[in-house]
Every structure is written in structure tokens, then in C-alpha cells.
Amino acid sequence: MFTTSYQEILKQVDAIDPIQYGKTRNHISGAVTKLSPYISRGVISTKQIAAIVLNKGYKPYAIDSFLKELAWRDYFQQVWIALGDDINKDIKQPQPNVGNASIAKAIMDAATSIEAIDKGINDLYATGYMHNHLRMYVASIVCNISKSHWKLPAQWMYYHLLDADWASNACSWQWVAASFSSKKYYANQENINKYCNTNQHNTFLDIAYENFETLAIPTQLKQIISLELKTILPLQQEIIIDNTVPTFIYNFYNLDCLWHQNESGNRVLLLEPSHFKQYPIATKTIEFIITLANNIKDIQVYVGEFNELVQEYSLTNIYFKEHPTAKHYKGIEESRDWMFKDVTGYHPSFFSYWKKCEKILKLHY
């Protein structure tokens, strides 16, 4: 479903129809780009995509929805940078009406009785992808109807996503659960039918919006279970290091094959067990990133901690890209390619962040 060829990825970027995207993106069958796995893995950047599209002559106001969706990713990353590990806690206020810290078994088993939801979960397991609107529906059912705290279910979804981005994932779940927004997000069966091409009725979601706050936990969602998510990393193989040239460190969030591509250097994809213990991912995601990494010439995979790599191979001249998960790296830290590099820091809402971004867009386009 998702190519790992860099040239094919660029073709997908070139094929974007931002107008049609804006009109149909909320529909399951809409003109979404499906570029999120490559953005999350740092293969391509939001800045790169925006520039390619805008350079075709589109005016920012005409493709506002498309640009905003790209900017949401950078916004959530800025929240993670500002909050650090506190992104793993309720950000603005405690999630309301939490009844458990687990997840409904029906969600795990794709057995909620809501056809679009169950199909979306099964597709997630099979492909590593779920449409963004479906993600919101699932989070709403989990947090606001079965009353689970957002953290463990968010980890479950992250575990299975090829585009696993903890900032986007954690903040989006908190937005739905009202710990990072002013109110809970609900979607009834009519809404789901509209956007998911279904015609289902008489479900526990087939109610008016004003009735959601008093809705009892449906029978289908009452059984809850805990999860033990583990990452199975490949066995470490010996790598070859030339200490006369720099070492460029790649990781789960940086697989940019253009980064220093014309310079001699050791190129190491670092897979740290400590990282994947905190943020576990499925085997298919590990396989996906290792295959994506093959776009980077002479890349070698090192399974171990950063300090172990440095000590084992006596590394001194090290380069890496900034990221909240790379705070413990030592060496020369380089900036990522932000859409709006001057709009930084914590903003309490996307609206306040976007207002500053819009000013920059108006100056340049």
C-alpha cells in the first residue's frame, strides 16, 4: 500500500490536488495524500511539500485547508518540544469523566458493531494506516463513550501506525478527550455514515448530539483489557565505521536521504531499545523504516543506545537532527525543515499558531 521508493514518494507529492483535498479530505474515500508515513519518518518535510505545491501557482487562500493540515503536524511537534515528556500527561486540564486506564476489548477486536469503525481497525492492523477522520471517531468512542483515559489507547494506535508520530497522536487524542481542548469531540452514526459511505442505523451512536453526555457505556464497550506493547528489534550486526569522516545519525524520526547526501560520512540508523520501550511499535513498522532507510546510500543499522554506539566505535564528529527523542544525543544538532521556522514555542491552540503562520504566507506568496 505504501511505497518505500523515494522517487515514487516524490511522484505522489507532485500528484497532490490541494483543491480537491480541501473539498473531500474528511471523507474516507476523499483525495487525501497518504504522505503521512513519509512526513512522520522525516523522509520528506512539511516545508518541502508546501513549497512544491505553492510553486505550482496556487494561492495560499485557495489551498488553506491543505496548508493547515501540514501545519498541524509542525504545531504538534512544537508542543512536544515545549512540553517534553509532559506531553504524556493531560496537557490543559484533566480528561473529564475518566472511568478506567485501559481500553475496550471491542476496540482491540474490531467488534464495536459500528461497521466503519470495525473495518477501519482491521485495515489499521493489516496496512498500518487509518484515515484521520476515523482516528477521531475511534478516539471519541474510546475516551468519551467507554470513558478510558487517552494514554494507553493512544499508545495502541501509535503502535500499529506506519505514520506513528507521538506528537500528532498524543495531542490529537487529548484534543478529542478534552484534556487539550475546551470540549469533548463526539460523532454520531449519521456523521459516520456521511463520511464513511455506510448506511447503518440503530447503533449506540445513532442518537442526537445532546444525548451523548448522559449516554451510559454501551454493552459492547464494557469489557476492558490492559495491553503489553513490545517492539521486536532486529539483532545487532557489526557495522563498519571510518573515524576520518563524520557520522550522521538517523533514527525513527529522521530518514532524510537528502541530508548531507553529497558529503562523505558514516550513515547510521540508530534503533535504541530504550526509545522503543517508551514508544513501542509493531514489527511491520520496524520493517517499513528499515526498508525506507535503504534510500540512504551506505546506511548501516545499529541496534543499541546512543552512548553505546559512541563508545564502541569511538565516535567524535557526530551530526544529528533536532527532535524531542534525540535530546540525549551529543554532537552537532541541526534544525529540521519547518514550514515556518520562525514560529516556535508553545501555543495554547492551533489557531494562535496558525495566525502567525498566515502572516508569513502573505509576505511570501
Image (cartoon, helix red, strand yellow):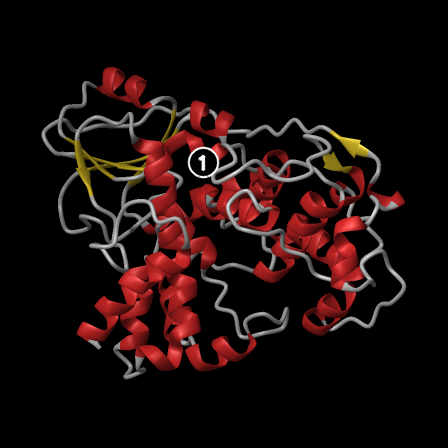
Residue 234 can be seen, yes or no:
no
Would you place residue 245 above or below residue 44 in this image?
above
Instruction: Give the left or right position of residue 121, taking residue 240 as reference.
Output: right
The quarter holding residue 186 reads: bottom right
Query: Is the residue marked by circle 1 packed among few (<14), some (14-19), or many (20+) residues within 10 Å?
Result: some
Residue 281's x, y, as percent?
54, 36
- x, y percentage for residue 336? 25, 48
Tell me: 272 left or right of 313. right
Splitting the image into 4 quarters, where does residue 28 fall? bottom right
Q: Secondary structure at mark 1?
A: helix
Report the number of discs. Answer: 1
**What's the residue at 70%, 61% (across, down)?**
187
Which amino acid type corresponds to the residue marked 1 in the rendered image?
Ile
Specify the quadrant that holds the N terminus.
Answer: bottom right
Label 1: which residue?
Answer: 87
In this orientation, does residue 10 appear? yes
Is residue 230 toward the left or the right of residue 65 in the image?
right
Location of residue 309 in the rendering, given as x and y in whole percent from the top left corner:
29, 21
Q: Nearer the viewer, residue 169 or 38?
A: 169
At a point 54% along the width and 49% down the height, the residue shown is 175
Of 43 and 241, the residue lying toward us: 43
**Residue at (42%, 71%) from the top-left corner?**
66
Q: Quadrant of the C terminus?
A: bottom left
Residue lying at 14% horizontally and 42% vertically, measured from the top left: 264
Picture coordinates of residue 310, whole percent (x, y):
24, 20
